[in-house]
Image: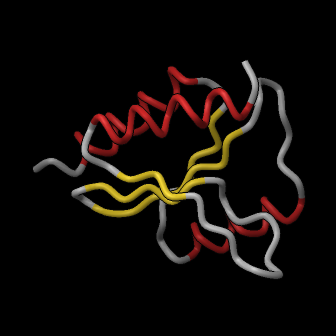
Amino acid sequence: MTEADIEKAFVAFAESKGCHALKLRIDGKNGFPDRTVLTPRGVFFIEFKAPGGKLRPAQEEWIERLRKLGFYVAVIDSVAVAEWTLNTVLKANDK
């Protein structure tokens, strides 16, 4: 399964859960995570990779910046992990 296939499946799953998985591009700033996920409980970010794919340095830098700001950032390489991640975020914040 390709990175695009995993991402597309996740977007549909997120929408089925009432969430929005936005594809944001920041001019002149390469490496920003693939999706910004808006949930009823907050925002988190996902960087998608094909199975065995590696992060580029610019992606590592963005992930570090976002995590230092307190955001959850997941690096995901399968549909199952993507769905598990969203379900876990929704349950963890459902108190």
Specify whether 91 is left or right of 30: left
Kindly identify the residue that appears in the image at 57 percent across and 67 percent down.
Answer: 67
Farthest bottom residue in view: 28
Taking depth in this image into account, of 67 and 56 the one nearest to the observer is 56
- The tally of labels here is 0
Classify 22 as above or below 47: below
Colouring style: secondary structure
User: Which quarter of the figure has residue 30?
Assistant: bottom right
User: Which quarter of the figure has residue 14?
Assistant: top left
Farthest left residue in view: 95
Kindly identify the residue that appears in the image at 88 percent across and 54 percent down.
Answer: 56
Classify 45 as above or below 14: below
| Residue 18 horizontal/vertical position (percent) | 25, 45
| Residue 76 horizontal/vertical position (percent) | 63, 36
Kindly identify the residue that appears in the image at 22 percent across and 57 percent down.
Answer: 40
Specify whether 32 is left or right of 39: right
Classify 77 as above or below 19: above
Classify 71 as above or below 10: below
Taking depth in this image into account, of 66 and 22 the one nearest to the observer is 22
Kindly identify the residue that appears in the image at 79 percent across and 77 percent down.
Answer: 29
Quarter placement of the N terminus: top right
| Residue 39 horizontal/vertical position (percent) | 30, 55
